[in-house]
């Protein structure tokens, strides 16, 4: 399977031995939780994967999936707004998630490139 084929379904292996299949467009973000990764969808309770975040990221299309922080990969198609707090950027996700995700300072320029936006203030 090539990377271009991976957009169809994201396979998430759980501790119970079940493999869940997701349409990537359903995924809002992925989050590191110890040695596991939490897959966050519109559902209130996340799905827990035994795979590491970096491994799952290789299975997702880029864009729209973007590693905004060491602990987070976000689906840019699910970002409603970019909020600034001091020198920090945060990504506000669409409802019903409405969560704010941090953007690592070293990833700001890459985020702007991924969004096709200017990195300078105009």
Image (cartoon, rainbow, N blue to C red):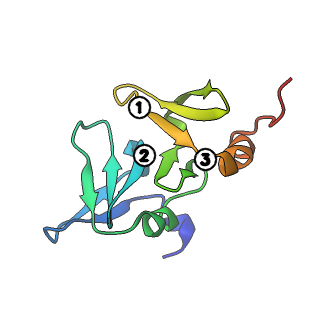
- Residue at 32% in and 62% down: 34
Judging depth in this view, the residue of 17 and 21 nearest the camera is 17
Query: Residue 57, image x and y in percent?
Result: 49, 62
Mark-to-mark CA distance, 1 and 2? 10 Å
- 33 or 10: which is nearer to us? 33
Left or right of residue 79: residue 109: right
Q: In which quarter of the image is the C terminus?
A: top right
Say which element carries label 1: loop
- Residue 30 percent coordinates (x, y): 40, 51
Viewer-side label of 1, 2: 1
- Give the CA separation, mark 1 to mark 3: 16 Å
Residue on which the image places disc 1: 99
Label 1 close to label 2 by CB (< 8 Å): yes
The residue that appears at 41% across and 42% down in the rendered structure is: 28
Kind of element beneath mark 3:
loop
Q: Determine the secondary structure under disc 2.
A: strand
The answer to which of 116 and 102 lies nearer the viewer is 102
Q: What residue did someone put label 2 on?
A: 29
Residue plotted at (71% across, 49% down): 110
In the rendering, at what x and y percent does residue 91 appear?
Answer: 54, 34
Q: Which residue is drawn at 53% across and 40% down?
A: 102
Q: Residues within 10 Å of mark 1 (few under 14, many from 20)?
A: some
Q: Name the residue under label 3.
A: 104
């Amino acid at each position: 399977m090539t990377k271009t084929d991976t957009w169809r379904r994201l396979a998430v292996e759980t501790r119970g031995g079940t493999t869940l299949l997701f349409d990537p467009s359903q995924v809002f973000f992925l989050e590191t939780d110890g040695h596991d990764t939490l897959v966050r969808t519109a559902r209130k309770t996340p799905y827990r994967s035994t795979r590491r975040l970096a491994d799952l990221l290789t299975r997702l299309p880029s864009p729209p999936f973007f590693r905004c922080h060491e602990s987070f990969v976000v689906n840019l198609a699910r970002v409603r707004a970019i909020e600034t707090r001091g020198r920090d950027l945060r990504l506000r996700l669409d409802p019903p998630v409405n969560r704010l995700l941090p953007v690592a300072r070293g990833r700001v320029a890459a985020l702007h490139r991924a969004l096709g936006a200017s990195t300078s203030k105009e």
